[in-house]
């Protein structure tokens, strides 16, 4: 056998064995499917300072890895099946590690604060940790008006503490380079805090942001405000119906049959609103808008 | 000078023969793969993360080349006994050491330059078509020339590592040279702790030793401006120049030490 033929035969044999290994692997997967276990995620190093030393000169790249992990943790918990208890337990430690390794990682503070403040089960519902994260960012960059603005939002939206929110907006407005609408926003928040109109103008400003993720967040809040407006109108019609039919257990079908509604009303995401037998209207738990601000944590 | 150039060119050719530049393929795969995947994983931080990834890879790959090629520069010639005919030629031992050092620096320079070009190409690709208002939200422009400052200091950092490897290679085995070089590199990362030794211990002697080590050992943390550059924070040209000067002086000291040791070695 010539040398070339010998080499060709060896190459063909190697390719065949590789193909056989692939086939065996696929067959093994089909025959012995791997068990789906709801394993807890682990975080071996929780100290940012320790990790900063372990990362040597490469703290920026390691911060990126923790940032990606924080995003995946949040996404995995948020989209987990109903039988999984969402804890978001690693979210703050991961964000803390990220921002200790890279103290200038703006999006980790800002997006992280949105994640942390998000009401349960869409997020951990920890505005206190969102505030802690943003304050950590401010300790590194005291002139970062964006962090002050975000602090204002956390106080406004999650804690309904309009006085503190207005104070943060005012402080942000005094930083050179802050948008001109920040000053009026502080005044409106102080005067009309808690009014839906003030909230709407606040999120409409954010919706103009250059950051796509911030725009998405604002769009979600605006949709929630639209849903709250719709709920007010629906509850008014329900009350009209109840006045004429006292003591009746309510359904959408009854209201539609009586001509109060053209059909089952849908929220801005296209999910039907929920009507309780007592006549309370709310968004469905299946809707991405659930829970609305102020709804009971469940 | 001619002898130094000849030795340096020979080292560079040997690096090519030893397929040292294959690491560039890995770098390219990492960068291109990263740019495709990262956009979907990082909530709009792809430019920042590609910069981090590329600067880290440039530093890590360069470190591996500097250490694992550097430690063999002298010892390989001794083990192969090719040192005998070499020293029989009109090449002084000092020229041999300096030539070896510059040969590896040339290899590292080609490596770093190609990686830099690849980084800018990927950043250009990523920033193409991004609306100006989104670009304004970035800490630093995608094609930020300030990246060159970080890359220049990575190269300076690698030059010091190379000098360390050559120094240890001039008298010890490759294994020990690698351990010493890597050890000093790690110690040099935490050099600032030695300066603050007085906050931990009260013994004046220990404090004095800590301070002495701080000044004598190479301060590798000074060469790291990656984070600052990626976030568009100012890194003055004066800082870069001063750090490069510090490195140059340190390298000269190490090479003189290596020449001193190598000149006294008996190859009989």
Image (tube, rainbow, N blue to C red):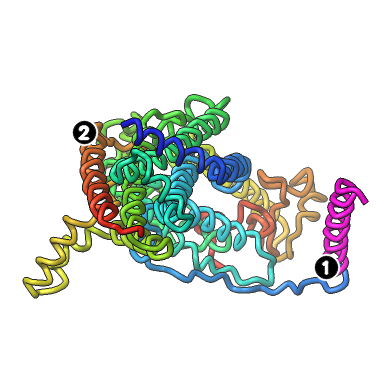
Label 1, label 2: how many angstroms apart (C-alpha)?
60 Å
State which chain disc 1 sits on: A
Q: Residues within 10 Å of mark 2 (few under 14, many from 20)?
A: few
Residue segment shown in magenta: A1-28
State which chain disc 2 sits on: B
The x, y position of residue B42, in whole percent, is 54, 47
Tell me which secondary structure the magenta stretch mostly adopts: helix
Q: Are marks 1 and 2 on the same chain?
A: no
The x, y position of residue A66, in whole percent, is 48, 57
Closer to the camera in the image, B174 or A198: B174
The x, y position of residue A89, in whole percent, is 50, 68
Residue holding disc 2: B238
Compared with A112, B30 (above or below) is above
Compared with A261, B137 (above or below) is above
Q: Which disc, if any, is residue A168?
A: none
Q: Residue at x 28, y 60 (%)?
A: B190
Q: Residues within 10 Å of mark 1 (few under 14, many from 20)?
A: few
Residue A223 relative to residue A192: left or right: right
């Amino acid at each position: 056998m010539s040398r070339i033929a010998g080499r060709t035969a060896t190459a063909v044999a190697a390719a065949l064995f590789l193909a056989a290994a692939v086939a065996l692997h696929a067959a093994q997967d089909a025959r012995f499917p791997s068990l789906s276990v709801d394993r807890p995620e682990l975080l071996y190093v929780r100290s940012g300072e320790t990790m900063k030393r372990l990362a040597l000169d490469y703290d920026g790249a390691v911060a990126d890895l923790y940032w990606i992990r924080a995003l995946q943790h949040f996404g995995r918990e948020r989209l987990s099946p109903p039988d999984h208890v969402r804890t978001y337990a690693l979210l703050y430690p991961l964000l803390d590690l990220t921002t200790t390794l890279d103290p200038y990682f703006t999006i980790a503070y800002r997006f992280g604060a949105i994640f942390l403040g998000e009401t349960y089960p869409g997020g951990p519902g920890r505005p206190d940790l969102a505030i802690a994260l943003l304050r950590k960012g401010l300790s590194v960059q005291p002139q970062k008006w964006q962090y002050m603005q975000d602090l204002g939002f956390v106080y406004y939206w999650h804690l309904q503490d309009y006085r503190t929110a207005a104070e943060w907006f005012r402080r942000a407005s005094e930083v050179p380079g802050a948008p001109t609408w920040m000053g009026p926003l502080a005044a409106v928040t102080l005067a009309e805090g808690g009014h839906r109109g003030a909230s709407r103008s606040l999120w409409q400003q954010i919706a103009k942001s250059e950051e796509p993720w911030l725009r998405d967040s604002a769009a979600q809040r605006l949709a929630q405000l639209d849903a709250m407006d719709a709920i007010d109108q629906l509850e008014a019609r329900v009350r009209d119906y109840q006045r004429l039919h006292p003591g009746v257990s309510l359904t959408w079908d009854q209201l539609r049959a009586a001509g109060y509604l053209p059909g089952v009303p849908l929220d801005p995401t296209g999910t039907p609103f929920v009507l309780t037998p007592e006549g309370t209207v709310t968004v469905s738990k299946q809707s991405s808008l659930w829970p609305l601000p102020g709804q009971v944590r469940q | 000078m001619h002898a130094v150039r000849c030795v340096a060119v020979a080292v560079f050719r040997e690096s090519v023969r030893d397929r040292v530049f294959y690491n560039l393929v890995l770098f390219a795969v990492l960068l291109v793969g990263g740019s495709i995947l990262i956009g979907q994983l990082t909530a709009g931080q792809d430019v920042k993360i590609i910069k981090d990834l590329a600067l880290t890879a440039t530093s890590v790959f360069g470190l591996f080349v500097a250490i694992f090629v550097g430690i063999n520069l002298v010892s390989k010639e001794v083990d192969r006994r090719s040192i005998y005919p070499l020293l029989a030629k009109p090449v002084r031992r000092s020229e041999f050491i300096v030539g070896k050092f510059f040969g590896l620096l040339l290899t590292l320079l080609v490596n770093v330059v190609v990686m830099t070009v690849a980084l800018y190409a990927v950043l250009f690709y990523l920033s193409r078509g991004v609306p100006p208002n989104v670009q304004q939200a970035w800490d630093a422009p995608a094609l930020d020339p300030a990246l060159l400052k970080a890359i220049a200091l990575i190269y300076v950092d690698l030059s010091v590592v190379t000098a360390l490897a050559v120094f240890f290679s001039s008298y010890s085995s490759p294994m020990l040279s690698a351990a010493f070089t890597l050890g000093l590199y790690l110690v040099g990362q935490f050099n600032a702790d030695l300066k603050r030794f007085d906050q931990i211990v009260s013994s004046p002697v220990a404090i004095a030793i800590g301070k002495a080590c701080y000044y004598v050992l190479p301060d590798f943390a000074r060469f790291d401006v990656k984070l600052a550059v990626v976030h568009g924070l100012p890194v003055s040209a004066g800082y870069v120049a001063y750090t490069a000067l510090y490195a140059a002086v340190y390298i000269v000291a190490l090479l003189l030490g290596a020449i001193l040791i190598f000149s006294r070695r008996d190859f009989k």
